[in-house]
Image (spheres, rainbow, N blue to C red):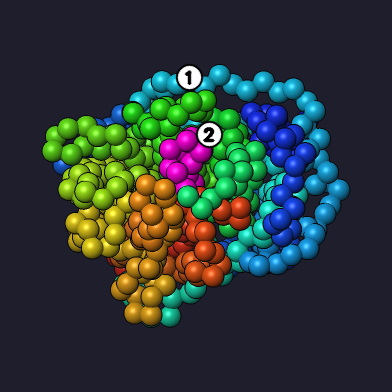
Amino acid sequence: MNPVRRCSALLQRDFTALCLSSLGSPKTETPKRVASPSSRHCHQSSGGEVLTCQPQVKPSGASSVSVNTRIAGPMGSGSSSGSSSSSRLFGTLAQTLSSPSIPLALPAALEDDDDDSCDPADPDLLLRECEEALRNRPARWQRGFMHPTHVDVNPRGPSPDQQPIRVMQWNILAQALGEGKDGFLRCPLDALNWAERKYLILEEILTYQPDVLCLQEVDHYFDTFRPVLSSLGYQSSFCPKPWSPCLDVENNNGPDGCALFFRRDRFEPLATNHLRLSAMMLKTNQVAVVTTLRCRASGRRFCVAVTHLKARSGWESLRSAQGSSLLQSLCAITMEMAVQDASGAVADEDEAGVPLIVCGDFNAEPWEDVYRRFASSPLGLDSAYKHLSADGRSEPPYTSWKIRRSSGESRHTLDYIWYSSRRFCVNGVLELPNEEQIGPDRLPSYHYPSDHLSLVCDFSFSEPTQPHRLL
């Protein structure tokens, strides 16, 4: 099968009937999407329970494809730019493709997925297919990158031999929760139709082409994100919540959880830990995935983690305890990796362990205790999105903005990308849309698939100042 057709089939196979239904009744009241060329910025190409640890994952030799992304203007109208490949998008709708059986009760943790069986897909062609599938929806916002002008915490600057590492953090909104539990007052149910919403999510990922992708509220991992992103060169790991609220929704697609993806051509996985976070010595429903990666080009190692802490006001103490649980686990993991394989390690680890990047929906404003715990941790973490502020000390005013039937309108800063401030330099951060671009109905909407905004940051390793202590 043609690689692009295969990727299209993977996207279409589970909801063919819904796709056909949406084609039969386009939303004529919304402006059409307009594609305009754009290039990537800043980018050269308490103790949680450890549920699994899978070292020695077989590396893959898949190669990356450099593309020129096509970003739609924020308020444009007109017809989408077509291509012969775009006609393939709905060609698979007539095919009967069987979906894999997804059990409602998944194991507590899943092993690393090194599924490179999918034929490689061209991300540029797939991005155009997304634009074609979304041609009757409003244009997506055009977001630029902001390059920090103030002095970084680390004065040594980036290492000259390193390509930047692009990291994307995003709570994508579980499909079962969006349609069945969250009660978005101003969002039409049709805007949440998975047959089109999945293309909005994929379009966002394809536009920014992260090297590391951290997602929360993933309930379509097996039938959508794992196969499609594998065909784009990503390896992944998924940890579902033990008691996912998605399972309370009729016709759900299984539990939601955290998923971590990374480019196989850039990184070799050394170990993966699935954590079930604890609070006051009790296991909770929140999880994390921690993966240690080695850069294939330079041999440098770093850990990346993705988590999703307890939601809702009134649970601040629980979030703080979960944060402590995660920090303790991260300290142990990074220190353990720092002393392993010392003979072959690059001289980039010190007493703080290997460098660390932590992404997540913390469900916590900057004034909460869990935020202060991360900011004052001995791991030396800082928040990348503080670089959007003039002085580099303030978080953005919001990362989530929604209107719910139960709680009304809420605008909060809940999502963060933490990083080892002495080991990484921040090259750029993706700006957030303003109130006018978001619109009066807030999130989610026809032009944005989630109630959380995606965060994207480009990192470079800092220039080391001394040899590794064990060499």
Disc 1: which residue: 103
Name the N-terminal-most of marks 1 and 2: 1
Residue at image coords 54%, 64%: 439
What residue is shown with label 2?
A: 220
Q: Nearer the viewer, residue 434 or 72?
A: 434
Nearest to the observer: residue 429 or residue 184: 184
Quarter containing the N terminus:
top right
Asked which quadrant contains residue 96, the reply is top right
Q: Position of residue 121 (x, y in %)?
A: 70, 42
Task: Give the distance between the C-alpha atoms of the residues marked 1 and 2, in whole angstroms.
Answer: 12 Å
Give the side of residue 465 with respect to residue 320, left or right: right
Q: Residues within 10 Å of mark 2 (few under 14, many from 20)?
A: many
Asked if residue 6 lies in the magenta stretch, the reply is: no
Could you say which is closer to the camera, residue 241 or residue 439? 439
Q: Quadrant of residue 228?
A: top right
Visible in this render: residue 230?
Answer: no
Of helix, strand and loop, which one carries label 2? loop
Residue 199 circle label: none
Q: Amino acid at mark 1?
A: Pro
Q: Nearer the viewer, residue 199 or 68?
A: 199
The residue stretch that appears in magenta: 169-184
Q: Amino acid at mark 2?
A: His
Indicate the secondary structure of the residue bearing disc 1.
loop
**What residue is drawn where x is 67% and y is 20%?**
98
> x and y percent of residue 167 in the render?
47, 55
